[in-house]
Image (cartoon, helix red, strand yellow):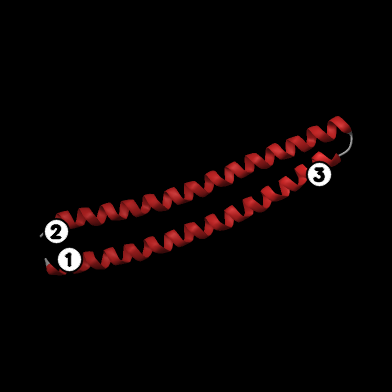
Amino acid sequence: MRSVQEKKEVVRLVNERMDQALEQTTDLVTVLREMLSVNLETTAKFLMIHDDSSGEVGESARVAVGMTHGLVEACMQVSQDGALLVEETKSKIEGIRKQVDQLESIVNKLV
């Protein structure tokens, strides 16, 4: 059977890993938002160049507007999905953390 010190170390490591998982999920959402933001800026620059060169929007710019609209929707969806993923992950981590705390409490009572 493991010593109390070993069990406490396991609990500490589990808590550390859960914190890392939450941080990585948050980082992923941030990166996805940034990627979509860059794509949106690029499309907007194309629209400005096209408008400056021809004096009118034209068909290709209308396509770019459609792409921009799609990117905005995608960005909003990623934000919503990411926020939901972070909240679900946070909730799961809290559930696991409570279980770990309960197990630690039981171990401490036995020792």
Q: Disc 3 marks which amino acid?
A: Arg
Q: At numbered mark 1, what does the secondary structure look like: helix, strand or loop? A: helix
Residue type at mark 1 is: Val
Residue at x 35%, y 54% (from the top left corner): 18
Compare marks 1 and 2 and give the one earlier in the sequence: 2
Of label 2 and label 3, which has the lower sequence position?
2
Q: Amino acid at mark 2?
A: Val
How far apart marks 2 and 3 lie (CA) works out to: 67 Å
Kindly indicate whether the residue at mark 1 contacts the one at mark 3 (C-beta within 8 angstroms).
no
The residue drawn where x is 49% and y is 47% is 28
The residue carrying mark 2 is: 4
- The crowding category of the residue bearing disc 2, from other C-alpha atoms within 10 Å (few below 14, some 14 to 19, many at least 20), is some
- Which is closer to the viewer, label 2 or label 3? 3
Residue at image point 85% right, 30% down: 53
Query: Which of 80/5 is in front?
Result: 80
Mark 3 residue element: helix
Instruction: Measure the alpha-carbon separation of dots 1 and 2.
Output: 8 Å
- Quadrant for residue 3, please give it: bottom left
- From the top left corner, tell me how far across and down residue 34 is, in percent: 58, 43
Of residue 52 and residue 3, the one placed in the foreground of this image is: 52
Whether pointer 2 and pointer 3 mark residues with C-beta atoms closer than 8 Å, the reply is no
